[in-house]
Image (cartoon, helix red, strand yellow):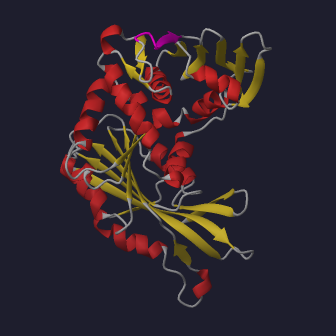
Amino acid sequence: MQNSCRQGESDLAFTIETNEHSFLGQQVPIGQVTNELQALFAGDEKDQDSGITRASLINLAIYQEGPESLEVAAETVAEIVQEAACRSILIGADTKGETGAKAWVQAHCQILGRDYRKTVCTEQLAFQLTGATPGLARNTVFAHLDSDLPLVFWWRGEFSEAFSDRLFTRIDRLVFDSCSWSDPRSQFLRLRQASAEAKASFIPHDLSFTRLNPIRSSIARCFDDPLPRKEASRISSVEIRHGSNFRMPALYLAAWLATRLKCDLLANESDTQSFRFRRRSSGEISGLTVNLKAVDEGCEAICSVDMKSNNAHFSLNRKDNNRFWELTSKIGDCPANVELLPMPDRSDAVLVTEILMRGGRNHVLCDALKVVREMLVV
């Protein structure tokens, strides 16, 4: 068994692997997973300081269907566990082929002390299931949970028959990515039905929304000062330009703006590209119009945001080869205020780590999700 080392900011991290290129770890018989995992954490009986200490605050299950390799998911986990201590359970389910299962065990470790002898490690279990049934995948996860710890379930891809009440009623947090769905409307309907179940209390986390956090923070920055804050309630039109394959982030951003401006959707006066909202405070029919424009300019997700009132114009645009956001605020005859804000490149691993570290009830997403569901049926 070889050790692959990576130098971190404050300490040295390494991953126990069976070969140079595998992030899955050591392949073991399916019935010996628990024993082999315990063996990874059994130190030398003659030297108690040479052992490794298990650390886990949460269960993280990553589930994907199809013939795709688990290696990508395992690489993502290797990045996540550098910040979040969790038992990770990777499930690859392929309904085709003969029924079978393969299993791997792995430990991701942080070295403690100057002598590099004492380590704190997190566990990784990986399973490749072929000819898999929904029950087999579900039972594989539940049979290997670290008991009494919360379960964060990252569902990669579209919901299938495996997403049943016997599964989602046991989940504490459900992570998914609506940007990868071919039919978001039906998928959100399935999600709504699941959340309506009497025993289902999972907290949803959509990566399509989480990716918007820097953009939402930049937009909120427009209204830090009292003068632009007064203009926020007077904004009457918004244009969101987005990449052709990133309609879901644009819908989320429009929904978030509507909830922040206390607006309700007028479905009968909206279409798939232009949404009209009524302000709750004034009851004006023409309170807010949000236009979505798909563009093919090489930009991903959100390309720009323009917000206008009768007396002000606020805009957010990508600059310097997508390294910065240019935030421009122009109110009346006052000179325009221009700021450059960093545009962080955040991987899925960073997004999920952020979810694991923050926790909370995720009320902002839940509020926006209600509006998104209404927008999808226009």
Residue lying farthest right? 335
> Relative to the observer, which residue lies in front, 160 or 353?
353
What's the residue at 67%, 23% (across, down)?
Answer: 228
> Relative to the observer, which residue lies in front, 48 or 254?
254
**In this rendering, position of residue 148 left or right of residue 39:** left
Q: Quadrant of residue 330?
A: top right
What's the residue at 58%, 63% (across, down)?
Answer: 2
Q: Quadrant of residue 97?
A: top left
> Is residue 287 at all visible to an observer of this figure?
yes
Q: Give residue 225's position: percent from left, percent from top.
A: 70, 30
The quadrant in which the N terminus is found is: bottom right
367 vs 154: above or below: above
The quadrant in which the C terminus is found is: top left
Is residue 287 located in the magenta-colored stretch of the structure? Answer: yes
What's the residue at 49%, 75% (across, down)?
Answer: 41
Q: Give residue 343's position: percent from left, percent from top.
A: 67, 31
Q: Give residue 122's position: percent from left, percent from top.
A: 51, 65
**In this rendering, position of residue 67 left or right of residue 83:** left
Is residue 355 located in the magenta-colored stretch of the structure? Answer: no
377 vs 69: above or below: above
Query: In the rendered structure, which segment of residues is drawn in magenta?
Result: 285-295
What's the residue at 55%, 75% (across, down)?
Answer: 52
**In this rendering, position of residue 145 left or right of residue 231:** left
Q: Main secondary structure of the magenta part?
A: strand
Q: Give residue 110's position: percent from left, percent from top.
A: 62, 66
> Relative to the observer, which residue lies in front, 277 or 251?
277
> Is residue 183 at all visible to an observer of this figure?
no
